[in-house]
Image (tube, rainbow, N blue to C red):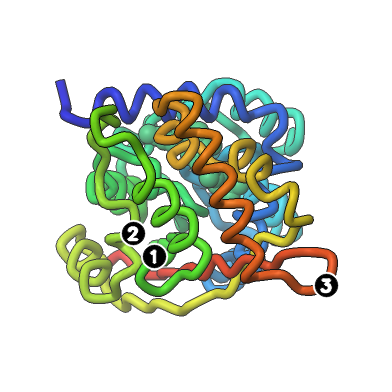
Amino acid sequence: MSIYSKFEKLEWIGWQERAALYDRTTLKMTGPTIPRLIELVKPRATDHILDVCCGTGAVAKHLLPSGANVSGIDFAPDMIEQATVSVPSARFVTGDAQDIPFEDGSFDAVLTNFGHYHLPDPDKAIREAARVLKPGGRYGFTTWVGPDASKGFRLIFETILGNVDQTVTTPAAPDAFRLADETVAKQVLESAGFGEVAMETFRSEITCAPDDFVAFLKAATVRATFVMKAQPENVQRRIEALLREGVEMFRQGEVVVVPMPNRIVTATLQ
Ligand SMILES: C[S@@+](CC[C@H](N)C(=O)[O-])C[C@H]1O[C@@H](n2cnc3c(N)ncnc32)[C@H](O)[C@@H]1O
């Protein structure tokens, strides 16, 4: 049993619970990168493309105009159900990004929009992407920038981790932001057999009414939310109040615009 089994279980429950509301919540954070990710991977009508951690199928939907043959996998069956309804022309199956249920060399391109953050072993998912790609196949993924360079994640993480009851244990979880470091991403990709690694920064924001920020976070995020929910009620309320107060620094008129930069990483299988 992995030290991250509890983390994995909470992720699974969290995404199952969010599938029906995903397009109105989390997708507001994850959606903006998709056109650029697709542009960089240059889909062709003759391509077979796999969307890993597909969620409700937003990447697959954006791939439709390319004419490519699109498949998607996600470990949450309720996400697969939503994706199947949303993009009937694509083929969606329940499956683990770290053990992709397709044969070696099946795809011309593999995409993952904000998936690695949720995996116990993101490096294994990268090796799996390499395995299912044909030689010369293109890989593209997006990943959040961590609190050191993201004002949004700094507010969220510092407020939560700085105020938790230290006697409450939270499940062990892998470093969420490791792949946003260019040196690390290059090393992991190259050791999986990729070359031509490139990375660019993409600016996303959470835009909402200040009073809606906490509710949005709880609806849209799994990891931050399960850390909060493990806390006693009074600690949760205090963290929520501090987040509400803290988000004021991003006020622009009636709304707050919280910067959530991320990186788009592309590579080619050698
Ligand atoms: C932030 S959502 C991104 C969804 C979609 N790519 C998008 O851009 O909207 C993360 C997705 O990863 C899925 N996921 C998490 N762990 C997974 C795993 N081990 N294998 C496959 N999918 C996983 C979740 O169910 C969820 O749908």
Distance from Cα at disc 2 to Cα at disc 1: 9 Å
The front one of 187 and 261 is: 261
Q: Please state which of the two labelled residues, at mark 2 or mark 3, is closer to the viewer.
A: 3
Question: Does residue 70 appear anywhere in the picture?
Answer: no
Q: Give SS at disc 1.
A: loop
Closer to the chain start, of discs 2 and 1, is: 1
The kind of residue on which mark 1 rests is Pro
- Asked where in the image residue 178 lies, by quadrant, the reply is bottom left
Closer to the chain start, of discs 2 and 3, is: 2
Q: Is there a contact, CB below 8 Å, between mark 2 and mark 1? A: yes
The kind of residue on which mark 3 rests is Gly
Badge 1: residue crowd in 10 Å (few <14, some 14–19, many ≥20): some
Residue that numbered label 1 is attached to:
147
Q: Position of residue 174 (x, y in %)?
A: 25, 45
Q: Give SS at disc 2.
A: loop
Q: Is there a contact, CB below 8 Å, between mark 2 and mark 3? A: no
The front one of 233 and 32 is: 233
Q: Is residue 245 shown above or below 103?
A: below
Residue that numbered label 2 is attached to:
177
Q: Is residue 155 shown above or below 48?
A: below
Q: Position of residue 173 (x, y in %)?
A: 27, 39
Residue that numbered label 3 is attached to:
253
Left or right: 5 in relation to 16? left
